[in-house]
Image: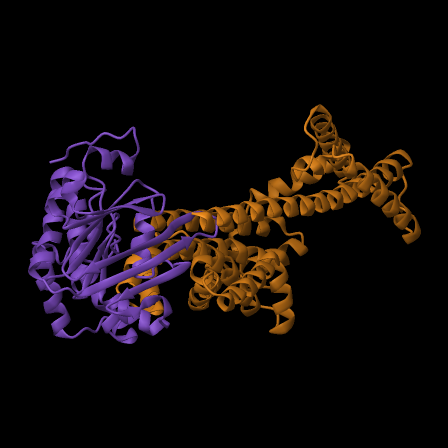
Amino acid sequence: MTKRQRDEQKIKRMLAENKRNERRVNFIKAALLDIFLVFYSILVMQRAIIYKFFLDMRDVPFSWGQISVIFFISIVAGVLWTMTRTSLSCTLFDVAKEGKASKYTAEVFGWFLFDITFIAGWIVTKISLIDLFSKDGLEGAQRIFSALFKPEFGIFDDVLFATIETIYLALIATLISIPPTLVISFFTARNLMKENKFTFVIYYILRIALNFIRSVEPLIWAIIFSVWVGIGPYAGMIALLVHSIASNAKLYSEAIEGIEEGPLEAISATGANKIQVVWFGVVPQIVLPFLSFTIYRWDINVRMATVIGLVGGGGIGTLLMQYQGLARWNEVGLIVLVIAFVVWVMDYISAKIREAIY
Amino acid sequence: MGKINILKVTDLHKMYPNGTHALKGVSFEVEAGEFLVVIGLSGSGKSTLLRCINRLIEPTSGTIQFLGRDTTELSTNGLREVKKQIGMVFQQFNLIKRKSVLANVIAGRLGSIGTWDSIIGKYPQSVYDDAMECLSLMGIEEKAGVRADSLSGGQQQRVAIARSLMQKPKLLLADEPVASLDPATSNSIMQYFERINKEFGTTVICNLHFLSLVRRYATRVIALKAGEIVYEGSPDEIDENWFKTIYGEEAEEVEIR
């Protein structure tokens, strides 16, 4: 009995200690965020609102000295503000003083940040209703629209061939992406990898790598590969392949993470080994979601292949780029029409197939 | 009945990472051929106890001796040898839903089949014969070809029992096997456990909720409360007072037939 009571007290002490540590860490986080927010507010107000708008400067002067001074002021102001325990960050990290003051400052400063960001965004984007409705502008718009609605069917065979190239390119990228994605997805599923430290490190490294690859747009991969293997459909295919693997591995591994644990438990209780547990417990539960994601990826890839063509990835996008450069809007009109049609058909087919297999 | 101790649990503790102390020093012994029923409220540690026995859950401290070997000290391979001899049946049946009943039953033999053979589905004829025999023991051999998730709850549980019989288990663990079933089906499932216990001499450890079922099938009862054993003995001796101790003052016994 006494041993148990001692144990329980020990656990209570540990929990209290953990809570104190957590508060300390949260306080430091709040201070860092406050410093950043103050720094951000001063910079935005000075550069975007005062220099650009009120003084209407074309080239905003830049000096490291000035930035350093602002940064120093922010550190002092930010830390002081956090120490009052009434700042926005204190509320966010749950270390604020109870009471009206914290609530009030959080609300006011939150709105202030939103407002200056919106105003700065408005100034930076150079929003202008005059440009939108000027006489020259409207005439240009009329010219291009009338051409687009009179598509030039003389180049129909070229457009058709380029479209087929795009669809095949997307298909091949999708098909080749399947085997590596399958393998990777098992190593990036948390529930399969969390058990020992070694596999968890692999999980972590792979996740970071995939996140990085995914955050680089296929457009940029296409630029990289068009230098690497030369401009054309091959570069576009590799760009889509890389992006497909990274994106689908995430979806696949999320499907693996969402499976029912029960059958795994049951299979493992029969004395089956790890591979058998995965094959009999995991695989039957994920075949259909995988199929569905893959078909959807083909659909996405067709759309992306069009955009990738713009930077030399081959197919219909490259053709579009050529005619746009020559300002031949009637030809562009046909290409746009065909792209819209293909995207619509692909979307319809992939939705139907995905409906049917579920 | 020989007095062989099939299982000996000594001072078993389980502390979950979130601080829940699910088992607080549980000790008991099980003789070969017993039908031991574990009762207790939800959260009293029944499921944790069962899963510690075949190490689906790692115990924090204490020893579990299965046929004289301490399973808490075994390597991965040694542990698989132990698991092969312990069948398990679950509340949610835990079948592979999209596969046939036969494939599910065969899965009970995975521990004795090579990895590659099991992946390409190459099993000796004897495995198929055994699987059909287990199914006919459970009275559902005509369902062998249908998908597991097309069966009713009671039928699914029979498939799950057939799967555990494929292991030719010395010990059968059942974690609330009838909690998701209606009363009539519950009784028939419990009768299958009784038959397995009597005809094959398989030791059964079963978590149950309903005392009427406990009195009818158990040869011995252990009651858990907040991770500790509060009662151990014959099912007939659980009277009103014991019942209130185990389930709390508010509890009243409900009859199911």
Tell me residue B104's x, y (percent): 21, 60
Nearer the observer, B223 or B213: B223
Check the image and name the residue furthest to the front.
Answer: A2
The chain displayed purple equals B
Tell me residue B160's x, y (percent): 19, 55
Nearer the observer, A41 or B88: B88
Check the image and name the residue furthest to the top.
Answer: A100
Residue A310 visible here: no
Tell me residue B219's x, y (percent): 14, 50
Is B57 situated left or right of B191 in this image?
A: right
State the residue at coordinates (19%, 73%).
B123
Q: Is residue A10 above or below residue A42?
A: below
State the residue at coordinates (11%, 61%).
B201
Q: Is residue A186 above or below residue B26?
A: below
Is B151 situated left or right of A344 in this image?
A: left
State the residue at coordinates (45%, 49%).
A4
Q: Quadrant of residue A105?
A: top right
Q: Colour mode?
A: by chain
Q: Quadrant of residue B56?
A: bottom left
Number of labels in the image equals 0
Tell me residue A113's x, y (percent): 74, 34
Is A46 situated left or right of A319 in this image?
A: right
Q: Is residue A3 above or below residue A225?
A: above
The chain displayed orange equals A
Residue B95 visible here: yes
Nearer the observer, A19 or A265: A19
Nearer the observer, B140 or A46: B140
